[in-house]
Amino acid sequence: MAGKPLTIALIAGETSGDQLGFKLMQSLRLLSPDCRFIGVGGERMTEEGLDSLFPISDIAVMGILPVLARLPLVLRRIRETADFIIASQPDALVIIDSPDFTHRVAKRVRQVRPDIPIINDVSPTVWAWRPGRAAKMRAYIDHVLALLPFEPEAHQRLGGPPCTYIGHPLIERLDEFRPNGDEAQRRAAKPPIVLVLPGSRRGEIARLMAPFGEAIALLSQHYAEPIDFVLPAVSHVEANIRHAMQDWPVKPRIVLGEADKYAAFRTARCALAASGTVTLELALAGVPQVVGYRVSILEAQLRHLIQVSTIVLPNLILGHNAVPEFLQEDCNGPTLAKALLPLLSETPERAAQLAATRELDQRMAVSVPPSTGAARIIASLIKQ
């Protein structure tokens, strides 16, 4: 990318997008050392040299009621961000996840400056929810960078923009949660380590702690030997977790921080997990799991609109339900404990999940790191 220094506009709406954004900035700088970045990002993107227009905490809201409460501020930030990018005339605009915010900015930019290439890093879940969005995206998105290997086919089938699988960022971190020799021996040793992962959001904690607590109590009763339960937690919900655990007859050890979380992954025999990215982390770590999840009453009314038969990422990637999942009323202590029990021993259920994790590796493999692949596609679109 020789010639005048490039200006790339980046918009990330939450912490996960900030993590992707800073790696993308590093990879773009390898292609164009003088590259300048503008837009919206978090702590990591700021450390890489982005002067964010405003804190991403202004727009990092999830759930219907929280969004409504902050709607006037979010709408103002959409207008401000679009106006800033239009005035700055960047060589490209990269929107990272958070489609409720970033896509609205992209639409405004496209209306005024149709010459600016717009790249969507992280495909919206058009394959699961509101599939009509895919075709509409063609009007304001030039290319989609997909983190999941089935997404390019989904966009093609639904009439969406050109889409390339670049790889999930977790595959750059496999060494962090895969066991070495000693850790593999601990994974097979006694007492077995069982992970309890009730989520990282307060709503998830409120809905899942009771059935998860009942499940591990029943598992302890039905398994003939002691079990070492470990609950990796993030600090902002630690107090909620400890409060919910007060009356549990079986209390897991709580570990905090990502390093201790992945250390637990490397030695765990199996896991009970909330739906989310953690299910993909567990699968890539080779940890058999059972997934339980409950949503609010309002969100439950929308279940019939979901277009897929599973909400578990490894199952979506594999195309079959290798990981058992139990939702809403099925997410209860006895059901979860019954599904977990065979994963503690060398059973057909455990063997099947381990085989699925090996298949997952093959499906998710890429030739270059995801951020490198993304940077190359962005550079190619700018040249065009």
Image: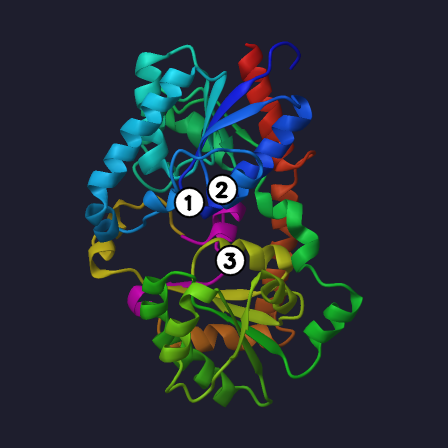
Work out whether 379 lies above or below 279: above
Q: In x, y percent, where is residue 136? A: 31, 24
The amino acid pointed to by label 1 is: Glu
Pointer 1: residues within 10 angstroms few (<14), some, or many (20+)? many
Q: What residue type is labelled 2?
A: Asp
Q: Is residue 98 left or right of residue 4?
A: left
| C-alpha gap between disc 2 and disc 3 | 18 Å
Q: Mark 1 points at which residue?
A: 14
Q: Is residue 52 above or below residue 44?
A: above
Is label 1 or label 3 in front? 1
Rendering coords of residue 285 (x, y %) = 63, 59
Label 2: which secondary element? helix
Name the image quarter holding residue 200.
Answer: bottom left
Q: Which residue is under mark 3?
A: 278
Residue picked out by circle 2:
18
Over which residues does the magenta segment extend? 311-330
Q: Nearer the viewer, residue 8 or 352?
A: 8
Quadrant where the C terminus is found in the figure: top right
Whether label 2 touches label 3, CB < 8 Å: no
* Marks 2,1: beta carbons within 8 A: yes
Count of numbered circles in the view: 3
> Helix, strand, or loop for circle 3?
helix
Of the 4 image quadrants, the one containing the N terminus is: top right
- Residue drawn at (36%, 32%), measured in percent from left and top? 102
Q: Nearer the viewer, residue 35 or 216?
A: 35
Q: Distance between the residues labelled 2 and 1?
A: 6 Å
Question: Which mark sits nearer the N-terminus, 2 or 3?
Answer: 2
Q: Which of marks 1 and 3 is nearer the N terminus?
A: 1
Q: Is residue 322 visible?
A: no
The kind of secondary structure element at disc 1 is loop
Residue sitting at 57 percent across and 42 percent down? Answer: 168
